Image: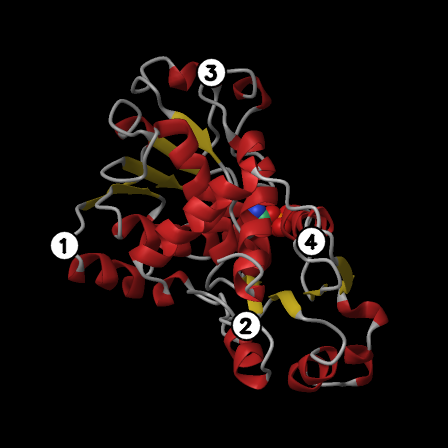
Amino acid sequence: MLKNKDLISINDTTKEELRYILDTIKKIEEMDCSNLCKGKILGTLFFEPSTRTRLSFESAMKRLGGSVIGFSGDGSTSRKKGESLYDTIKTVEGYCDIIAMRHPVDGSARLAANSVIIPIINGGDGANQHPTQTLLDLHTIRKSHGQVEGLTIAMVGDLKYGRTVHSLAIAMSLFNATIYFVAPQQLQMPKDILEVLDQRGIKYYMTESIMDVMDKTDILYMTRIQKERFPDPVEYEKMKNAYILKKEMLTNAKSGLKVMHPLPRVNEISEDVDDAEHAHYFQQAHYGIPTRMAIIALLLGVLE
Ligand code: CP
């Protein structure tokens, strides 16, 4: 179903495809796949900083028996001599079988996918999309709640610049979610995402207060205020501590509520939350391995 395809945006993905990937992640967790990608090479082209996405992609490919080439930051590449993204991608296409890339410009992953034949996986393009994060988020939700269908999720923080919540809102709309968007007005969810939710008849609400949603939501999805995307540093300074989740705030949380966060966190979840029964963000990050193993295997067509 996904052999030789790219993974660029959750907007391109059907519910059937999402279910198929989630089922494959489960299968990967239960099988020996140490030779599935023997002889295959993953290129990781990270033009923007990353800990989880790049390292979990690299670990995933190694666990599949394949190998990895790539770079983290373009300071040591010929981009510094003025080479275009198009030329870089066209060149690296000849060195590997599949590419995972992260780039600061919205739409860059699409440009890369349109330039080459091998599969391109978007590891985050600007403030636009982060589809593999969404797949690991869905896997985490399915593990913690038994299913993804019909849940209530509150997305908190920087909904304007946060690419993870753009992808996740679109994905959750395929599973009949009720969504609370918790953000200062200036950082609320962009109109193009809300239009998709409207077309799909999804119920969503906006508020500025976390406490408004605490007893209503199954998932409290915290996000970092995206300092690097603010055109005006003064505006960032005003917003940077808009939300800080503390353990005491979870006293009246809905039964079974899980706190998720794509990480890295800065101030938005106090460390005293880490040992609360609700805390789920480090487990969530660890699910990046089976998730990215499944994505690589499916796009390379070594697993059907
Ligand atoms: N969640 C996420 O994308 O983390 P990194 O920026 O560390 O890859």
The amino acid type found where label 3 is placed reads Glu
- Number of residues whose C-alpha sits closer than 10 Å to that of mark 4, classed few (under 14), some (14–19) or many (20 or more): many
Q: Does 170 sit left or right of 49 as displayed?
A: left
- Earlier along the polypeptide chain: callout 2 or callout 1? 2
Q: Which mark is residue 277?
A: 3
* Circles 3 and 4 in contact, beta carbons < 8 Å: no
User: Marks 3 and 4, how far apart in space?
Assistant: 32 Å
Marking on residue 91:
none
Pointer 1: what residue?
201
Q: Amino acid at mark 1?
A: Gly
Tell me whether circle 4 and circle 1 mark residues in contact (CB < 8 Å).
no
**Pointer 2 or 4: first along the chain:** 4
Confirm or reject: label 4 Cβ below 8 Å from ligand 1.
no
Q: Position of residue 114 (x, y in %)?
A: 52, 83
**Which percent across, then down, holds residue 292?**
58, 51
Please give the residue where the numbered disc 2 appears in the rendered image. 109
Label 1 crowd bin: few (<14), some (14–19), many (20+), radius 10 Å: few
Report how far apart the C-alphas of labels 2 and 1 lie in the structure: 29 Å
Report if residue 223 is visible in the image: no
Q: Which residue is mark 4?
A: 61
**Is label 3 in a helix, a strand or a loop?**
loop
- Left or right: 84 as drawn, with respect to 201: right
**Label 2 environment density (alpha carbons within 10 Å; few <14, some 14–19, many ≥20):** many
Q: Earlier in the sequence, mark 2 or mark 3?
A: 2
Measuring 60% from the left and 36% from the top, which residue is drawn there?
286
